Every structure is written in structure tokens, then in C-alpha cells.
């Protein structure tokens, strides 16, 4: 599978569509939990959270897949330090990139020879490649498939919700009002398409100043928790702002994979435990 082929992803004949549907069903039957990481708007740390979530699950021994369907702005490969194109086996199945013993990763970025290439596609082409990401990838047996979806409620999250049966949504937000307004739209989107919601995570929450120890609130506090309670959604926890999270992802080594300890890693572990319990 390559970018040129996927442009025609929405124009398959009936026989090919039936075969692809069967491949999708076979692939999904081997995946126990499917989680779509969503956000109402960009800039809330959704992709860094998805990366750290997948790395944490894999670190606990769960067979984990991480799929980046942010087709216009893929970032997962860079956050995990993955380079080069994806390989294909003799059965024309795409082989995911491996990170450690328990994590497999597929990103749009790993299909493009030029990482700065702009992807300019309409809905059918995007739907086609998302279906290929399930049907044509050698995921094998997984405990978790984490899907990093682009912000908002457009083609990609809709295609994922329609393609990955049994998937559940995990919504990431920051505490400020503008993000929370968009989160309510994401929650209503999930309910409209009958996508069960695992819960809501508040990112970039209050943190202790490294100089004086005073609590600093970049984007207010408790906004995510209040929104979750108001909308009848499970609140999974707050992750404090930590500059090391950004630095680690930029270096291709998410903070959950390293030796860094501290409030963010502790809070992340509690959030992951809550997710596992809810599933």
C-alpha cells in the first residue's frame, strides 16, 4: 500500500469491497479493545497523550497497536522516533513498525517518501486509506489498538467509528472554556454515531512551580472534570503540564518510555489504570 494507490481507495468494485470488508472483520476479531483518542480542537496534546498511552500499555505487557489516522498532520512516527517507509510481506500485508517488544505502529507519515509532502484529499480517499489501515495491515492479535484521530468531528473520526466496530472513544481536553466547548461537540458526535465513550482526560492541568512550589494553572483547573460530570461522561483524571512531555516527544522518546519520574508519569499511570478498569 502506498499513497498513490490509496487515492483511489474510495473507488473499489463490489468484489474488492467484499474482500476488504472480510479482511477488516478478520483483523478486528483479533483485537480485544479498540480506543479512538479524540479531541474537540487541536493543541490539547492529544497525539502526545495517545503515544504515551500506547507506550504505557505496552510497558505493562499488553500487546498494543498505535494507528495514526491524522492524515493531514501525522505526528506519531516522529514522536516515537520512527523513520523510513513501511515494509510489505509476500501476502501484500503492511508490516507495522515495532517499538520494543509489545508495540506496533502505523502512521501516514511512514507511507510518504517526503515527510513534508502535503496530503490533499477529499472524504472518499481518506475513508479508503483508513479502511486499508485495518484491512491490509498485519496487526495480528492485540490487547489494545489505540487510534490517534485528528481534532474535530470530520471525515477521519467518522470513518474510524464506522470501520472499527466495537471501538470506544477517549476524549482529551484542556481546562479552558474554548476547548471544553468543542469537547461537548465531540461527546455529542460520539452519541450521534453510537460510539461508546470510555471517558474524558484533562491534559495540561495545574502543576507545581519548579522554583517556588506554588500551584500554577495555565488553563484554569477542574474544567474537564466539571464538563464530564455535566455531560454524564466518566472523568479519567488530570495530567499536569510538564515541559518534559514536549521535549521527550520531540526527541522521539515519549516520557512514559524513559526513566523520568514525577507528577505527570504518576498521573498518567492512574489514568491508564482507570481506562483498563473501565474496559
Image (cartoon, grey):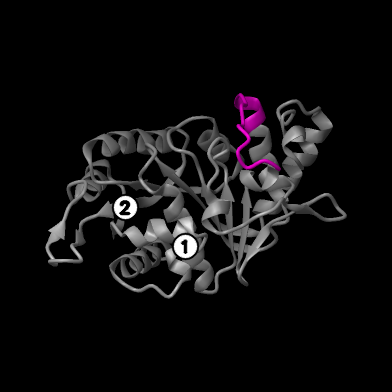
User: Residue 152 location in percent, x, y?
Assistant: 42, 34
Q: Residue 243: which quarter of the image?
A: bottom left
Q: Is residue 139 magenta?
A: no
125 part of magenta stretch: yes
On screen, residue 11 above or below 164:
above
Residue pointed to by mark 2: 203
Residue at x-position 20% and y-position 56%: 206
Residue 19 x %, y %: 80, 40
Name the residue tied to disc 1: 254
Is the C-beta separation of discs 1 and 2 under 8 Å? no
From the viewer's side, name the closer residue of 201 and 120. 120
Quadrant assignment, res 72: top right
Q: Is residue 213 left or right of residue 169?
A: left
Residue at x 52%, y 34% (from the top left corner): 158
Residue 52 rendering spot, x and y as whole percentages? 45, 61
* Quadrant of the rendering where the N terminus is positioned: top right
The local secondary structure at tag 2 comes to strand
Q: Nearer the viewer, mark 1 or mark 2?
A: 1
Give the class, few, some or many, for how many residues have Cα within 10 Å of label 1's Cα (few <14, many ≥20). many
Instruction: Please give the name of the residue rendered at 72% of the width and 31% of the height, measured from the top-left corner.
Output: 9
Side of 236 relative to 170 (left or right): left
**Magenta residues, start to end:** 113-126
Question: Which quadrant is home to the C terminus?
Answer: bottom left
Residue visible at 47% across and 34% down in the picture? 193
Q: Residue 68: which numbered mark, if any? A: none
Mark positioned earlier in the residue sequence (1 or 2): 2
Secondary structure state at the residue bearing disc 1:
loop
Residue 263 vs 233, above or below: the answer is below
Amino acid at each position: 500500500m502506498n499513497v498513490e494507490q490509496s487515492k483511489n481507495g474510495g473507488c473499489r468494485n463490489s468484489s474488492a469491497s467484499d474482500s476488504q470488508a472480510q479482511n477488516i472483520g478478520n483483523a478486528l476479531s483479533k483485537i480485544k479493545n479498540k480506543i479512538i483518542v479524540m479531541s474537540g480542537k487541536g493543541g490539547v496534546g492529544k497525539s502526545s497523550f495517545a503515544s504515551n498511552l500506547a507506550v504505557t500499555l505496552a510497558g505493562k505487557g499488553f500487546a498494543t497497536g498505535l494507528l495514526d489516522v491524522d492524515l493531514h498532520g501525522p505526528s506519531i512516527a516522529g514522536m516515537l522516533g520512527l523513520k523510513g517507509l513501511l515494509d510489505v510481506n509476500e501476502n501484500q500485508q503492511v508490516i507495522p513498525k515495532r517499538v520494543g517488544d509489545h508495540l506496533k505502529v502505523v502512521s501516514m507519515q511512514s507511507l510518504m517518501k517526503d515527510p513534508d509532502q502535503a496530503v490533499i484529499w477529499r472524504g472518499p480517499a481518506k475513508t479508503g486509506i483508513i479502511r486499508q489501515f485495518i484491512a491490509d495491515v498485519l496487526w495480528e492479535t492485540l490487547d489494545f489498538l489505540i487510534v490517534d484521530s485528528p481534532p474535530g468531528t470530520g471525515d477521519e473520526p467518522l470513518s474510524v467509528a464506522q470501520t472499527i466496530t466495537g471501538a470506544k472513544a477517549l476524549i482529551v481536553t484542556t481546562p479552558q472554556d474554548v476547548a471544553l466547548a468543542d469537547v461537548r461537540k465531540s461527546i455529542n458526535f460520539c452519541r450521534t454515531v453510537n460510539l461508546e465513550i470510555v471517558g474524558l482526560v484533562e491534559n495540561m492541568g495545574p502543576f507545581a512551580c519548579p522554583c517556588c512550589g506554588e500551584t500554577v494553572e495555565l488553563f484554569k483547573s477542574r474544567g474537564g472534570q466539571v464538563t464530564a460530570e455535566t455531560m454524564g461522561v466518566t472523568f479519567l483524571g488530570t495530567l499536569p503540564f510538564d515541559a518534559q512531555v514536549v521535549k521527550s516527544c520531540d526527541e522521539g522518546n515519549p516520557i512514559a518510555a524513559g526513566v523520568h519520574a514525577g507528577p505527570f508519569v504518576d498521573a498518567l499511570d492512574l489514568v491508564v489504570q482507570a481506562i483498563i478498569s473501565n474496559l
